[in-house]
Image (cartoon, rainbow, N blue to C red):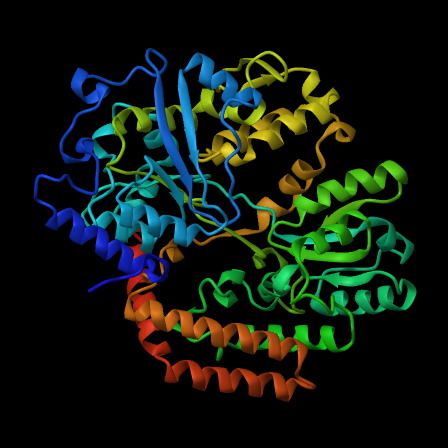
Amino acid sequence: MKIGKKTLGFGSALLALSLTLTGCTGGGGSAVSKEAEGGTGTAEAAGGAYALGEQPLEFSFYGHYDWYTMPNWGEDQASAWIKENKKVNVVPVSSGGNAKQKLNTMIVSGELPDVIWTERGADVESLRKAGVLVPFDDYLDKYPNLKKWAGEETLDMLRSEDGKLYQFPNWYTTQPNGNAGYLVNKKIYNELGAPPLETTDDLYDYLKQVKAKYPDVVPLEVGQTASGIDIISSAFAENRPYMYSSRSMMAVPSGDAMASVFTDDVFRETLVYANRLYREKLMSQEAFTQPLEQVEQKIITGKAAVYVASSPTEFGAIGNSILSAEDPEAGYIMVWPVHKEGLDKNKIFPGTYNQLGWNVSVITKSAKDPEAIFAFLDWLTGPEGQRISMWGPEGMYWKGVDEDDAPIFTDAFTTDTKGRDELMNSTVNLQWVGNTVYVDNSKMKFESTLPEEKKSWETKWQSEITWKTQYDTTEFVNLNPAGDSSEGIIEQSVGEIYEKARAQAIMNAGSEEEVLAILDKAEKDAQQVGYAQLLEYKTKKWKENLEKLGR
């Protein structure tokens, strides 16, 4: 059967790769390099641990995202230091703005990059089953940083069905982190008398005051695709992470099984509340159509009274700096997450974190020396690698380390904030194996020594509010099926029903009854395309996670 590359889906491409690997036995060579067929790299041949920096190491790196463009290696201070002192050169492979097509092309051609940086889950498992990934198990004791900092429980959660570890996590953690919550325009808030902003009723009343007095300000900004509404869902139940109601999960634990999001009381109450805000023009009217840049402009120019998002501090920090420089009374504060009247405010969690962190790096069998690459990634995730990739080489912003191996920051760290921030921004897209605990603890330890006026705006609110209000959702990782499986096809269909119903319920419904009718219809439509089968799959995966976690 002839398959055109332009129409080849991800799953089909992996199938083609699998057939190539198992079927090409002639003398013309296979789709993978000879190293993949049993060749040994320098570290393995030497029989000992790879000594990073003794000899040059070069490998190709592909970030599997439409939005991702890897900065040129060696042009920023951190990677330049690594290139010179560790003799590592990383060659970028661009997605060209179409990651799915790019990976398909590389798979079919057999020209895989040495490292792929991507989301955890079904697609990684497809690559693993195709036999193109290198397991890390033999490296863990030779190179101890990952094992030490991530811990056995996290690594076990990352193991594949064959019991082996193929995924190197990014921003893994054993403690809460995250920035989700409610950002409040300080000047507007104070000019309105700093009223209570504790309950959902308080928020509604406050937004009405804003609308009446500040006609050129958006009372409630909920971000692109109204994603902030998901965060608000946490206000309507205790110990309820927003992700249950999100497009990424679309399932709610009920007893020992996953249940429909469309029949969930909290999701329904959230959309009734959001619809009321939308109808009364108390929230952004263009939430479903505005680009992210438009959201940013509102925040940094002070044109929003309240901003709720999964990371409002990103724009809030910029806006606070700009606005407060012009007017000391202006800027942003954060408030404790709002809650429905009668609920315990200390059991409201607008944000989430999980031990596995964000995404992962996998090493393919195209790599000449996979162990050497692992050794580099392990160094990069360790204390020295994290110090250099976060705050640059020793000398300018830190000098020496303390008894906990944390950097001792110099005066320039607080006086040259412009230069420091420029350096840190230059390496953001090179942080592939971030170590959350090391970075956060180093930062907090230093911040605790500073007077209040010198503490960073972000760190203040992280320590006072956001890190205290993030929910551990490790048990819900990897619930999504492979896109080309029967459950994956169902998930796509249910997702389309979900997105349509959510938008209609918020924007088009004229009453609470109409919101609920839209969700009732969505439930019926979802069941017709196999939602029950998808929920059964998610239940099975959830129970497997609980077993791994010993819960």
- Percent position (x, y) of residue 92? 44, 34
Q: Residue at x 66, y 59 (%)?
A: 223
Q: Quadrant of the C terminus?
A: bottom left
Q: Is residue 4 left or right of residue 194?
A: left
Q: Quadrant of the N terminus?
A: bottom left
Q: Is residue 392 visible?
A: yes
Q: Residue at x 17, y 19 (%)?
A: 45
Residue 346 position (above or below residue 87): below
- Quadrant of residue 33 in the image? top left
- Percent position (x, y) of residue 254? 40, 72
173 or 344: nearer the viewer:
173
Residue 319 position (above or below residue 126): above
504 or 383: nearer the viewer:
504
18 or 278: nearer the viewer:
18
- Percent position (x, y) of residue 452? 76, 30
Q: Residue at x 53, y 32 (%)?
A: 71
Q: Residue at x 67, y 77 (%)?
A: 507
Q: Is residue 157 visible?
A: no
Residue 257 position (above or below residue 41): below
- Quadrant of residue 44 in the image? top left
Q: Is residue 28 left or right of residue 459?
A: left
- Percent position (x, y) of residue 89? 41, 23
Q: Is residue 7 left or right of residue 208?
A: left
